[in-house]
Amino acid sequence: MGDGLRYIGVAERRARLGLRHRLAGAARAASPAEVAESLVALHGTDPATVYLAVGARLADPAKTVARTERALYEDRALVRMHGMRHTVFVFPTELTAVVHASTGLAVAARERVSLVKDMAKAGAPDAAWLAEVEESALAALARRGQATAAELAEDEPRLREQFTYAAGKSYEGVHTVSTRLLRVLGVEGKVVRGRPLGSWTSSQFRWAPAPEHPELDVAEAQSELLRRWLAVCGPATEADLKWWTGWRVTEVRRALAAIKAQAVSLDEGTGYVVDGDAGPVAGPAEPWAALLPGLDPTAMGWQRREWYLAPELWPSLFDRSGNVGPTVWWNGRVVGGWAQRGDGEIVWRLLEDLGGAERRAVEAAVGVEAERLWGWVGAAEARVGAARVTPRFRTPLERELAG
């Protein structure tokens, strides 16, 4: 490209994505923990996303729900906690310390100050009172192992205290101490999400003590997190890295220098890969298709998405806040969307204008993936009696297809 850097084009980026994101057939994983380790983080804001993202990447997805629940709540190989951009993710437990130091500490400090300030404005008890309640609540949680906010309030009634937030503003509301405090403790790495109250699609969770972890140096933790992510998602631009991590650009540049990241040339400018990863990558041996859920870490992996998602498809596949809905993939690019109807049927629609032969190949491959998806989702729904999986953030095409 005239800058002396190796050029990595769209075709190679899509090949890397298919292999490293465990989507191409031969690259699929053996366990939920292996999926999470390969992707670094699974979006956890919508509980169903975790299971659907794992199932799409398992070589044998038949017991996706049972195996993922075991990894989360019995083996504790995975943990659901706050991470990048103040968002809830599922991480390998071994990354707890890295995530906490690299992304959680700065957010936690702001959240703590905000809570104390909001309580003071409302005339609620002060920081010393809050510290007493916190200590008592954490002790109660340690005794119980897992508990809902209501259960903790049985042990520490002061958690039920309420205060008015943003009095006089259009968004005025009443907050309960338990809601805000547990959120702060979550970003501080003291508590994590435990078992849901309902099925695997439930958004109501118990709380649990966070796994013990060492306190790491912030810069070292940022370098480690960026190294892991870049090994999976590289090449990526500085803007991609800043967006995904939520860090300041100076922190991104410091981490890139620390891991000796290699610069490469992309269509949108300079990108980066981990040291030694700039060479050519052979693509998957066979064509592949995938049905990925809303907020899937692949679809949400980069700020610049034109190389795998045509801009004209965005209005159908994203909500107004920028959350991606369920997507249909073919050989490293998004070609459509899917949904589940009330009767359980998996339905999908191609949005790309494909030629006859390619369209037939895509339709056949996507049909197989739809059957594969229903093979385990249907079994899981029968087990728990759930009607269907509905994304938390609904998009135009998903709503239309779901009826």
Image (spheres, rainbow, N blue to C red):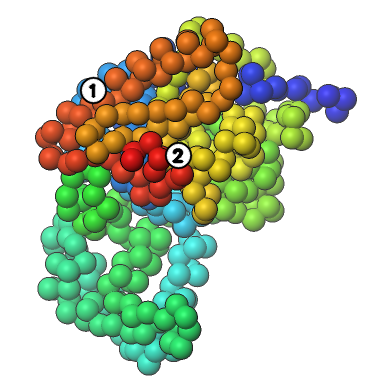
Q: Is residue 37 visible?
A: no
At 37% from the left and 92% from the top, the residue drawn is 123
At 30% from the left and 59% from the top, the residue drawn is 191
Q: Are marks 1 and 2 in contact (CB under 8 Å)?
A: no
Q: Around disc 1, counting alpha carbons within 10 Å, would you say few (fewer than 14), some (14 to 19), or many (20 or more)?
A: some
Q: Which mark is residue 311?
A: none
Q: Position of residue 279 (x, y in %)?
A: 67, 17
Of residues 12 and 93, the one drawn nearer to the viewer in this rendering = 12
Which corner quadrant holds the C terminus?
A: top left
User: Which quadrant would residue 201 be assigned to in this image?
Assistant: top left
Report the number of discs. Answer: 2
Q: Report which residue position mark 1 lands on.
A: 375
User: Which quadrant would residue 295 be assigned to in this image?
Assistant: top left
Q: Report which residue position mark 2 lands on.
A: 397
Residue type, numbered disc 2 = Leu
At 52% from the left and 62% from the top, the residue drawn is 106
Which corner quadrant holds the N terminus?
A: top right
Q: Around disc 2, counting alpha carbons within 10 Å, would you say few (fewer than 14), some (14 to 19), or many (20 or more)?
A: many
Estimate the spatial distance between the alpha carbons at disc 1 and disc 2, rounded to whole Å.
23 Å
Instruction: Tell whether 320 sits left or right of 35.
Output: right
Check the image and name the residue furthest to the right: 2
Q: Secondary structure at mark 1?
A: helix
Residue type, numbered disc 1 = Gly
